[in-house]
Image (cartoon, rainbow, N blue to C red):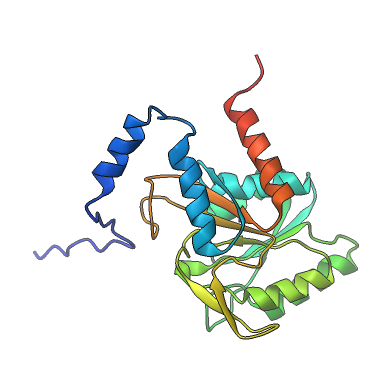
Amino acid sequence: MNVCKRIFLSPPHMGGNEQRFVAEAFASNYIAPLGPMVDAFEREFSEYTGIPHCLALSSGTSATHLALRHLGVRAGDIVLASTLTFIGSVTPAKFEGCELRFVDSSRETWNMDPERLEQAIGDCVREGRRPKAVIPTDLYGQPCDLPRIRSICDRYDIPVICDSAEAMGSRYSEIRPAQLEVHAGYGAWASIYSFNGNKIITTSGGGMLASHDRELIEHARKLSQQARDPAP
């Protein structure tokens, strides 16, 4: 009987410097939870993606959760999400008691279909319940049609939280106002990235919340610090 070799979705690759960086982290005496390595990681991630404000966290799921917390979502609010996604992209909305409604994918990209999104938002508005957020997914690293999704959501003043967990390094063409290539997640109100073991770069675990909104990142940093260091 022939046993097929296991094919990994994204096997880790060690480039040779990992042990040196781990040794530097230990030598700095900042083992957990924060320190100069994390500060440098946030800074370099911002430089690479072009998104000015970044917060390193324990997971991409926690990044989504903090973004929703900043929006003040509560039980009964509607959040729209992609049908084809990962559980961590949508569970934060359930943690807050939101009503999740799923928008189907386009045949071409498997990502959220902007036309169906517009229909879904229209249905919600006719019910008198404007969605609190839209969470599209950059599935398997392929960016969703974020410019079109954003233009639809902007008409209704709905923030876009882009799940770019699998899309570190991916880029897309921003058609408006000019042909410009930008990093996946760039242009969303908030963008989520993951560094789990099967992602493009890994810290074995962890995630990043990135945004052009400084207030979001400052508030999320405060909330994450309160979770780590609860009052006695």
Q: Nearer the viewer, residue 23 or 137?
A: 23
* Residue 94 visible within the image: no
Q: Residue at x 64, y 39 (%)?
A: 221
| Among the 4 quarters of the image, the one containing residue 188 | bottom right
Q: Residue at x 27, y 47 (%)?
A: 18
Side (left or right) of 232 relative to 108 = right
Q: Nearer the viewer, residue 43 or 155?
A: 43
Looking at the image, residue 94 lies above or below residue 125: above
Q: Residue at x 48, y 31 (%)?
A: 33
Horizontal and vertical percent for residue 61? 56, 48
Q: Nearer the viewer, residue 219 or 3?
A: 219
Side (left or right) of 168 relative to 175 = left
Looking at the image, residue 109 lies above or below residue 228: below
* Residue 6 visible within the image: yes
| Among the 4 quarters of the image, the one containing residue 228 | top right
Horizontal and vertical percent for residue 4? 17, 65
Horizontal and vertical percent for residue 172? 54, 77
Q: Quadrant of the C terminus?
A: top right
Q: Quadrant of the N terminus?
A: bottom left
Q: Check the image and name the residue furthest to the top.
A: 232
The tally of labels here is 0
Q: Residue at x 53, y 84 (%)?
A: 108
Looking at the image, residue 224 lies above or below residue 187: above
Q: Nearer the viewer, residue 44 or 1?
A: 44
